[in-house]
Amino acid sequence: MDPLTETIIATTGTGSGAVPLGILVMRLLLNTIVILIMIFGIYRPKQRPTSATRDLTFTFVLFNILIFFTASLLAVSSMKTGIAFALFAVFSILRYRTVQMEIVDMTFLFISIIVAVINSTVTRSVETEVILSIDLFIVAITAGMFALLNKNRGISLSVRFEQIELLHKNRESELYEELSKRTGFTIVGCEIVHVNYTQDFADLIIHGKILE
């Protein structure tokens, strides 16, 4: 028996013919399926296909896989303090980023980390059914909350509008209809910032809902 297997069995108490490598592979497959559902099934469909989104997708998936392997190895080592130190280091490095991340992006990064840590439990003290139940709950609550967040989500834009005759208070419905045609949003409010009657244009701030 190789030293790694002996360490796993000694640490986790999974002797009696148990195959730790098989458990590790099974948890890895489960972890990979969950993170792919989270990113490509929940996160990506609601995000604009920009280079930043592609970079974040790469980050989320790789973070998850690397932390899974790191946490798996630390979980079977005798250096228990190493687990706490590693997790502290993982969360600390998030502060040293050069690009400001949106709250939703940061949340999915934390999710990718937590999912990896949960699925890296290579022991029989925590049954696979329990891990699977936790994964399903995380996926379900994330999908539900993210759908709720994106349902009729509001947006505000600054626009320059040429048809200043529509700014009359009696023509508000026509103004909203025209702005809706131009932007693709359902307009729910409009603020007039500046009107130039010489050149016939107005600077507006419009508030709308994204059409699903």
Image (cartoon, helix red, strand yellow):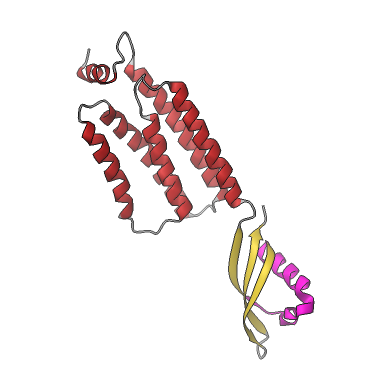
Query: Looking at the image, which residue is at 56% across and 45% down?
Result: 145
Residue 30 position in % (x across, y down): 45, 28
The residue sitting at the top extreme is 16
Which stretch did the figure color magenta? 160-185
Q: In this view, does 31 lie above or below 169?
A: above
Q: In this view, does 65 lie to the left or right of 43?
A: left
Q: Is residue 195 above or below residue 6?
A: below
Q: Is residue 42 magenta?
A: no
Q: In this view, does 96 lie to the left or right of 26?
A: left
Query: Looking at the image, which residue is at 33% across and 51% down?
Result: 94
**Is the stretch drawn in magenta largely helix, strand or loop?**
helix
For residue 188, what is the image quadrant? bottom right
Query: Looking at the image, which residue is at 37% across and 20% down?
Result: 23
Residue 75 position in % (x across, y down): 28, 28
For residue 66, what is the image quadrant? top left
Q: Observer-nearest residue: 51 or 37?
A: 37
Q: Is residue 181 visible?
A: yes
Residue 8 position in % (x across, y down): 26, 20
Q: Is residue 61 visible?
A: no
Residue 52 position in % (x across, y down): 45, 54
Q: Is residue 162 magenta?
A: yes
The residue sitting at the right extreme is 170
Query: Looking at the image, which residue is at 22% across and 20% down?
Result: 7
Figure disc tally: 0
Q: In this view, does 6 lie to the left or right of 141?
A: left
For residue 162, what is the image quadrant? bottom right
Quadrant in the picture for the N terminus: top left
